[in-house]
Amino acid sequence: MPATQKPMRYGHTEGHTDVCFDDSGSCIVTCGSDGDVRIWEDLDDDDPKSINVGEKAYSCALKNGKLVTAVSNNTIQVHTFPEGVPDGILTRFTTNANHVVFNKDGTKVAAGSADFLVKVVDVMDCSQQKTFRGHDAPVLSLSFDPKDIFLASASCDGSVRVWQISDQTCSVSWPLLQKCNDVINAKSICRLAWQPKSGKLLAVPVEKSVKLYRRETWSNQFDLSDNFISQTLNVVTWSPCGQYLAAGSINGLITIWNVETKDCMERVKHEKGYAICGLAWHPTCSRIAYTDAEGNLGLLENVCNPNRKIPSSKVSSRVEKDYSDLFDGDDTSNAGDFLNDSAVETPSFPKGIMHDDDDDTVLASGRPRQRSHFLEDDENSVGVTMLKSGSSLLKGEEEDDEADSIHNLPLVTPQRPFYDGPVPTPRQKPFQSGSTPLHLTHRFMVWNSIGIIRCYNDEQDNAIDVEFHDTSIYHATHLSNTWNYTVADLSHEAILLACESTDELASKLHCLHFSSWDSSKEWIVDMPQNEDIEAICLGHGWAAAATSALLLRLFSIGGVQKEIFSLPGPVVSMAGHGEQLFVVYHRGTGFDGDQCLGVQLLELGKKKKQILHGDPLPLTRKSYLVWVGFSAEGTPCFVDSEGIVRMLNRGLGNTWTPVCNTREHCKGKSDHYWVVGIHENPQQLRCIPCKGSRFPPTLPRPAVAILSFKLPYCQIATEKGQMEEQYWRSVMFHNHLDYLANHDYEYEENTKNQAIKQQQELLIKMFALSCKLEREFRCVELADLMTQNAVNLAIKYASRSRRLILAERLSELAVEKAAELATAQMEEEEVEEDFRKKLNAGYSNTATEWSQPTHRNQVEEEAEDTGEADDIEEKSEIRKHGQNPFSKSANSSDVPAVKSGAVTSSNQGRVNPFKVSASSKESATSVNSARSNILDNMNKSNKKSALNRAASNEKSPVIKPLVPKPKSKQASAASYFQKRTSQADKTEEVKEENPKNSSSETPVLCPENNENQRQKTGFQMWLEENRSNILSDNPDLSDEADIIKKGMLQFRVLSAEERKAWATKAKGGMASDGAEAKKRKCVVDESHETEDQKEKATENLNLPKKHKPLDLSTNQKLSAFAFKQE
């Protein structure tokens, strides 16, 4: 099975870097030119322990809890491991040491220096030193014989020497290397190595091959080389069993050979081709750690298994705990098998070891079945001794005759790994977006667009600092952290903190409501027993806490407990913005490194609803969630560990679209960007660059960088791909404007207009590009996305480009768009009319103005008796001319009063016009008060009016019609007082006046109908005159739409002067029509006046005595008094 190369990560600053494993192989230890020694639990460890040993560290070695380093101050230092406590200086040189190594049992250390000397020092007694003199240039590297008899060294003088340790004499010297005057000028650092256990062979990297010298005879047994090695080899290392040898070159190639067969087993190339300067083979597993000359650390896994037995890879307690969380109550004794990333390999058997009749113990893959997982062993099971028998073939390397006879055995080849089914992924722990890990003494509790909360938990202080980006929101705050708060959130209104429970105390939710107008600005809520808060968030006027009991608890910002609901799984993270709550939780168990997350999106306004109902959260393969939140404009977003930023696309059915890949902006594999905020207008991703880590330190204060968004479209390097990406990114990043409009929030119309203009410009550019490429079908597809004006520009462009067929297609498309717009307008009018009828239906049987228009006529008649008929008639005329242009008949003339009455103004002391009352007094009140115009004064920022609530109940779109002009206060009051007559008189007068009024109201609507007619265009005038010609030329045209299309094509052929003449003619015709309408209106008014005079004369004759009218000033006073009373 080929080796798996993990992505390299930043380890140290640029320069020579060394690497080794500890005795158990649980840690990787590196040192570099920054003077630090770092202890890594794994390659993915984002917070390695760091020990500063000096200005520069050239080499390190680790054995028996002693960490030895060669430092730039010319000393060999000792530190305890893993504490990192200084434990003295072993020896000194006159210049810096280049390499340091332990012997097999860790009792001695050898160091080679640039002053040509080699020293061997006893670790326990540094006074016991031996000095080896003989090199004529700086020493490059050293290697102890496993039997502690010999010491090998390589030097810049070109020689490789083998020293007898006991008497400090040189046993042999080979002139193998190129001479140089210093280590930095050496072509190769020549890290040589003895074969483990037996020490039979000494491997020396020379040029493009590895020379192996036989012990004691010092003869060159053989060379290991490969055709793929193109540069000098720099370093070699043996596998712990001594069967395999790995070598790294100065151009980043790692080659692994089987020493017995001399076959090349693996070839791995460095990602960037940097020189390999450190190689270390894991003491028990098939892993190799390596470093390069740029300070990076890498790891090879599944390298050919040296011991030919199943490696017992150590699984950290953290992984085991996660696994036990996944399967509570199950037997977790084999947890390591399920969670071990490295493949488990099977031993090889000679052909006769397994019996032919044991077919039931072998799967189709040819490997023995692991019965111990699911049933007891039986007589056909493969025993453990049999599994180990294969490895016994390799024992006895100590003796020469056995080593020679091993070549007669059958060739051992690696077999396919065991497959135990899909491996469950440990569940991701809950986290707060914008926070750094909990184990840090100085950490960010949250960093968002409002501010920063830092936590300090060290020997001196245990406190929380709150800092706001905008200090006008609130001043910086310092809080004592007596309750050990672990999670926090920050908004414009409050600071929210939460802590875990202890044996004595319950988990607490603590809110500092600094925007409160009263003096009490804090509240604390204790959770029930055995229930811990795992995630919190703040919104506008509310707070939320998700607990370990799979509950989500809502609170008002003032501390009132609100709704509680159950989560489908353990929470991962939460975020809030305005009325929106974004919850991510585990919806199941992920496998093979994938997390299985679900998402809920709720709106917690007056009308609470759920937008996303537990939909799966799309993460990159083998990644996990690192940030959840909203853009500044309120669009949900999240970021995964692979650096992919995804945003909710409301314009595509609430799907998730990747909008940025932060990894594209990183220089190194181990660099990351830590997201702190997202803005849609302007398009900015605000994040902090982290070199060699996933999160920033608290000090010094990190600098925020701004990254641009880029959707992952194909062929982004081409002009077409760039414009497509820009267009759809603009569309997506302005979807929030539609969301704000639908939820009655304020936004700038100018922003939307600029976005539409930008989108149409991009479409026109893509249209022109497609025209040049002669992609006319694509041109029509692009035109379908354009607005009406942009399509007209496209038609002109196509005509000037002499693409007549395209121009004709686009003309047809333009007509279709115009017809669609007209149809949409008519549908809106019909929906509006249906809505009015539904709204009016509920009041048809009550004594209100909408069902009894005769009350108004009766008021007018009474006003005539008091000498105010002219004023009332004038008001009535104004009211009728101000009727809704959407009305289609005289019967709907009163409907605008319903609309205006539905929205009331508090400063007028109005009563609810929808209230059903039998009292004529209240009815009269509603009649007159319904005349006021309220909708003209409404602002877009009004959240929900009574009309909107009614409309939503009817599930009909609300179209705001024109409303009648309001009557003057005096006229309304006069009408109010004139209604105080007896009910019997009202009935008689209604009976007498109904026929006259019904006949007199009809002509008054004629001017309204003229106003409702739309102004004719020049094309319509031309079409009316040329319709007959079109029909004669095309007798097959029957549909009106076809006639309009044909007419549109012919009309476009006309010259600009002719079209202008028709347009002028259309305007002139409308003006003359308006004049005639005014004349007709005057005639109608005169006839009405004569009829009214006749009626008054007859009434005066019939009446015995005319009542004296009240003084106008008295009426005004009474009307004002009446309105105050009401």
Image (tube, grey):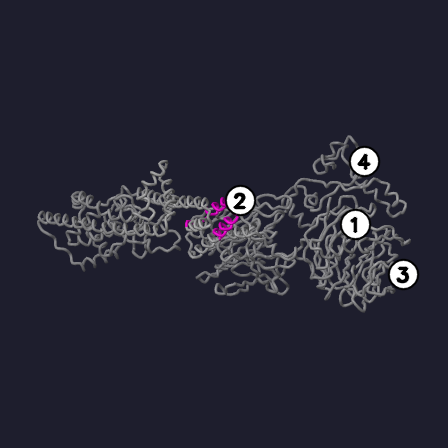
Which element is circle 2 on?
strand
Main secondary structure type of the part rendered in magenta: helix
Q: Earlier in the sequence, mark 3 or mark 2?
A: 3
Is residue 1119 visible in the rendered structure shown here? Answer: yes
What's the distance in space between the residues labelled 3 and 4, CA to CA?
A: 49 Å
Location of residue 164 (image quadrant): bottom right
Structural crowding at the residue carrying mark 2, measured as other residues with C-alpha within 10 Å and reported as few (<14), some (14–19) or many (≥20): some
Residue under pointer 1 = 226
Q: Earlier in the sequence, mark 2 or mark 1?
A: 1
> Which corner quadrant holds the N terminus?
top right
Which element is circle 3 on?
strand
Most extreme residue toward the top, as rendered? 357
Residue 170's mark?
Answer: 3
Residue drawn at x 60%, y 48% is 620
Give whichever of 1031, 374 is nearer the camera: 1031
Start and end of the magenta stretch? Answer: 762-788
Residue under pointer 4 = 351
Q: Closer to us: mark 1 or mark 3?
A: 1
At label 4, the amino acid type is: Lys
Q: Closer to us: mark 2 or mark 1?
A: 1
At label 1, the amino acid type is: Asp
Q: Earlier in the sequence, mark 4 or mark 1?
A: 1
Residue under pointer 2 = 615
What's the distance in space between the residues labelled 4 and 1, CA to CA?
A: 31 Å
> Which corner quadrant holds the C terminus?
bottom left
Q: Earlier in the sequence, mark 1 or mark 3?
A: 3
Q: Earlier in the sequence, mark 2 or mark 4?
A: 4
Q: Closer to us: mark 3 or mark 2?
A: 3
Structural crowding at the residue carrying mark 4, measured as other residues with C-alpha within 10 Å and reported as few (<14), some (14–19) or many (≥20): few
Q: Position of residue 941 (x, y in %)?
A: 40, 55
